[in-house]
Amino acid sequence: MQSSFLAWLPQSLIALVIPIVVVAMILPAQGADPRIGRQLDALVAAYPDHLAGHTGHELVWKDGMRMPVDDGITSKSAENFFDHPDIEDQFRFDYHLGAGGLPPDVDDDPGRVRFEPLFRKMYGDCRKDEVFPRLVDVAWLPARGGGTIRVTTVNGVDKALARVSAELDTLPDHFTKFLIPSSGAYNCRAIAGTERLSMHAFGAAIDLNSDETTYWRWEKPSAGGYYFWQNNVPLEIVRIFEKHGFIWGGKWYHYDTMHFEYRPELIGLAQPETIQ
């Protein structure tokens, strides 16, 4: 039975009106930003052991749990953006490969925004002793006597880092000082100056030799409150890590050039390298 609205229309127009109404109902549900679909596709592809798919509005876990993608807050302060992000916020900044995106623009921090519940569900909460049972020791640059580092087996992080180590071991000797000694991998701690868990707390990050790297918190800002990007780490090292799914903290305006973390979803979406 036709609605009262359609009953007033000539039959010849009903066939035209119905498709328009259906399209009008569908488009708002898809969201205004078409990029979110690609971003969620990359997230699902990056973590196939955990994620079954997405609806465009929710991330669907293999155990049936659903996580909203957007918290509905359209305006966030810089502080709240990092302290209270949603899944969509993780993709606000584009990650660039190799020399691309260097030096970063002011406040451009690709990968530094993390929706903590997502990572806690995948890797566990170290404060509840959920991460430790999943850790293994990985030989770090064995040809150079680098010892071992402890990382998670979840998402194959241990295997990815072993591949990184094997490839780094083929670099010339002058790269060694950046790589050995490592400044650590697993560490159940918060990010300095915050209450947010570090990716080290999930066993999914590694720091290179801190004596040869730079960190924004070690420097004083300019009179205008700006930080000037500094880096000593060769891009040959960065490219090897990126090849195996790790992003580099040197791509952040709030730079942390010793830091690499496993974020294959951002590598999958990464902008092509710009040779400089």
Image (tube, grey):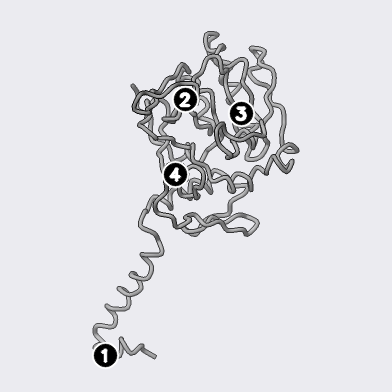
Q: Which mark is residue 216?
A: 2
Residue type (three-letter) at the residue carrying disc 2: Trp
Q: Would residue 223 appear left or right of 109 to someone viewing this image?
A: left
Residue corresponding to mark 4 = 91
Marked residue nearer the N-terminal end (4 or 2): 4
| Residue 199 vertical position relative to residue 176 in the rendered view, above or below | below
Q: Quadrant of the N terminus?
A: bottom left
Element at badge 2? helix
Q: Nearer the viewer, mark 1 or mark 4?
A: 4
Residue type (three-letter) at the residue carrying disc 1: Trp
Q: Is the residue under label 4 in contact with that under label 1 (CB below 8 Å)?
A: no
Q: Is the residue under label 2 in contact with that under label 4 (CB below 8 Å)?
A: no
> Label 2 vs label 1: CA separation?
68 Å
Q: Residues within 10 Å of mark 1 (few under 14, many from 20)?
A: few
Residue corresponding to mark 1 = 8
x then y, percent, for residue 79: 46, 42
Residue corresponding to mark 3 = 161
Q: Residues within 10 Å of mark 4 (few under 14, many from 20)?
A: many
Marked residue nearer the N-terminal end (2 or 3): 3
Q: Would residue 145 appear left or right of 268 to someone viewing this image?
A: right
